[in-house]
Amino acid sequence: MSKDSLTRRRFLQSTGAAAIWLPTTVKGYTANEMHALYADGTMQEDVSKWELDTPSLCVDLDALESNIAKMQSTTSQNGIASRPHAKTHKCPTIAHMQLDSGSVGICTAKISEAEAMYQHGINEILMTTTNVTTTKIRRAMTLRQSCQEFIQATDSPSNARLLSEAAQAMGIVADVVVDVDPGGHRTGITAGTPALELAQLIDQLPGLRLRGLLCYDGGSQHVKGFEKRKNQTLERLVAATNTHEQFQASGLTTEVFSGGGTGTYNIDHQTRGLTDIQVGSYVFMDAQYLGIGGEDNIEHFTDFEPALTILTTVLNDQYAGRCTTDAGAKACTINRPWAIIKGESGISYSSGSDEFGTVRYEENASRTYKVAEKIELIVSHCDPVVNLYDHMYAIRNNQVEAIWPIAARGMSA
Amino acid sequence: MSKDSLTRRRFLQSTGAAAIWLPTTVKGYTANEMHALYADGTMQEDVSKWELDTPSLCVDLDALESNIAKMQSTTSQNGIASRPHAKTHKCPTIAHMQLDSGSVGICTAKISEAEAMYQHGINEILMTTTNVTTTKIRRAMTLRQSCQEFIQATDSPSNARLLSEAAQAMGIVADVVVDVDPGGHRTGITAGTPALELAQLIDQLPGLRLRGLLCYDGGSQHVKGFEKRKNQTLERLVAATNTHEQFQASGLTTEVFSGGGTGTYNIDHQTRGLTDIQVGSYVFMDAQYLGIGGEDNIEHFTDFEPALTILTTVLNDQYAGRCTTDAGAKACTINRPWAIIKGESGISYSSGSDEFGTVRYEENASRTYKVAEKIELIVSHCDPVVNLYDHMYAIRNNQVEAIWPIAARGMSA
């Protein structure tokens, strides 16, 4: 807010008793005001993103669309499909864009996310986590009753039997894939004979229909250096590939063989039989993925454009070498590397404090900031950042074009 | 879920076409079902916390009430008051409990939190952050128009002038306190002459009413070791104390001299003139505060009881030395130290993965877990954990007594 604008302030009377105070050149819109301007689904006024109240989550539409198109063209060229993970964006609008571009479905990590996506018109849903409690199995089978394209993961014979009983009791045959452990021992059944025997059991159970297998190697996605990442991921997918072939040799359904992610999106197709990749972060990109290096750029992974940013405001500029902003851990998370100030250099950002961000200037800082100025941050790690916000502003050429609900925000159950 | 319970499963028909499947001994309630059971404000069924769908956030009422009573008795004995920070709980129900116990008001970090608290019947609100943009100042003055007891912080002459102009334009006199920097250079004006001159300016401005000063020394709250923490905090409050006395000597209002927090709650009263402490985490406690050590216990800070827990479910128990749960970073944050498994020893928990928690057994582990069993976690750092949930279950003797909305969840703007 410049001093000029303040000397030219104007006073507007509201319809009620309360007076409204506004400097002329700076309007500024609260989230409630933005929702009112967008109540019928089109923006009723031109609003620059710089006029948004902060912290605000923004997605640049040109970058987002470019990322979705790039993924689609790459997977098509490589003879596989994408099945993007909605845990990243939790946003039905983006899920629909991905499906419209040619993705064969979306993934969810939680049953609540799957329910939210289905409620927003999405049918092709693969839940990559096994439902183990009565409550969760009941929710999954209830969803499957109405959502014909819902597939869920299972990773043990006892769980498969439970799922089959529940499906039978609810009058359906539920679609399942076997979750195969890539070696991290986090989820999934051991590749080879245990996985094969589970698949054979599923094939016999009256309440289940086997659709194939998945093997998500999360541990390989952020390996720094393309060659190292390639070698690790292809090596760790060998056991799943062999398992897939054991399924085939046994006459089992192998329609789905899903794995991989953003970090290995141009590597996974070299795995024999792989049908689709569960890419998530490519839609947004973030500081974590920027640092892993790409095939053509050893230092930076530039295959996709940073699309997701946080707008923050400088609250205090009184002390040398630094300023304080309004976006701390509750707006940015404390993931590392920290968020990156877009378009500037020699300036670091950290959000270790719950409520405040800290900007520090290095000797070669490209600029400094004054109180009330706004800063745009490339997010550190997109998934948990999205989970902090109820909506994101869809931006094109710095103007707000839409407000997208993050319908599955907070849906960790 | 034990195998016994499954062999005794029963099948219930729902009113519609869809059948409902339930094992007899395990019911389980989704969040939606819990809200239906609590629709009129009293629980319509006895529900054990162990039947809640997970991840779920729980607050133990006996521990919470004990913590609030302990804080009130301590501050009373020490001749000061508490002004608890609502950024910790974001929950109007708890704010009302604090005020009912004798707190002189609550604090908020954000204007959106202040609005939410006011909408839920709370009037005595001190916003500890300075509002610097047109949008935020407008929101603050709009709140002040209806909320007579709303006080806001300011930390620069230019901001004070802006606030005064806005207040005048909106036909009010706004209450402010001077935010004094304790030395961390994060927010606030420099103690001594700069703070005094700002107070004198406020005293002259037609739209503002000076109420005093605040000085929150966040950097001292988690210093490990009582003596070290005491020495640091009292030393860092000297400049603010001198400033407070300069205010008095100049005939300025010094009705409010607010500072301190949970880590220094039994230290801050030794600061001359301090009126109240902005304690937050004491209501819940967390793993971070447990580690700072207390006056009577060098290792553990046991002055308050851990009241806030997360319930999580084991998803996979197939691999040696570990199991995987459904509460990862999106349910627990990645703050350190990690969450602590309540009532067990020799078992560590980590939530570095977005969707999954990892349990690891040490040689002396007090037990192991099987798939579908539930685990109760003492949260790592209460403030950002609360910010991930829409409601918390209020628990007494392991039964759900109420569901409390976290009305200011996600309110970072």
Image: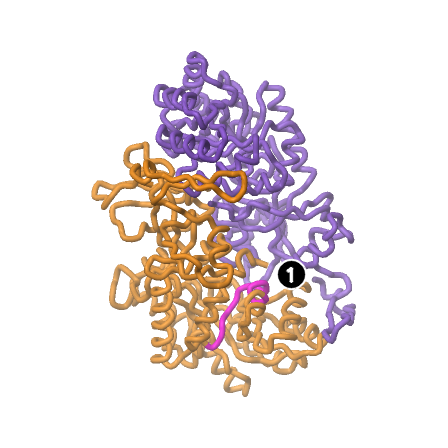
Chain colours: A purple, B orange
Q: Which residue is label 1 attached to?
A: A372
Q: Position of residue B110 (x, y in %)?
A: 56, 63
Q: Residue B299 in the image: x percent, y percent?
A: 26, 59
Location of residue A305 with respect to B110 vertically, above or below: above
The residue shown at (73%, 61%) is: A27
Whole-percent x, y for residue A292 in the image: 51, 33
Q: Say what amino acid the circle numbered 1 marks.
A: Ala
Tell me where residue A309 appears, x and y as whole percent. Answer: 61, 46
- Within 10 Å of disc 1 (Cα), the crowding (few <14, some 14-19, many 20+) is some
Is residue B41 magenta-colored? no
Chain letter, disc 1 residue: A
The answer to which of B379 and A214 lies nearer the viewer is A214
Q: In the image, B54: left or right of A89?
A: left
| Magenta region | B104-115
Please determine whether, in this image, residue A40 is positioned above or below residue A203.
below
Of B138 and B400, nearer the camera is B400
Q: Residue furthest left?
A: B364
Residue occupying the point 69% across, 45% down: A395
- The quarter in which the N terminus of chain B is drawn is top left
Q: Quadrant of the C terminus of chain B?
A: bottom right
Going 65% across and 40% down the picture, which residue do you hit? A93
Q: Residue at x 53, y 57 (%)?
A: B409
B196 lies left or right of A9: left
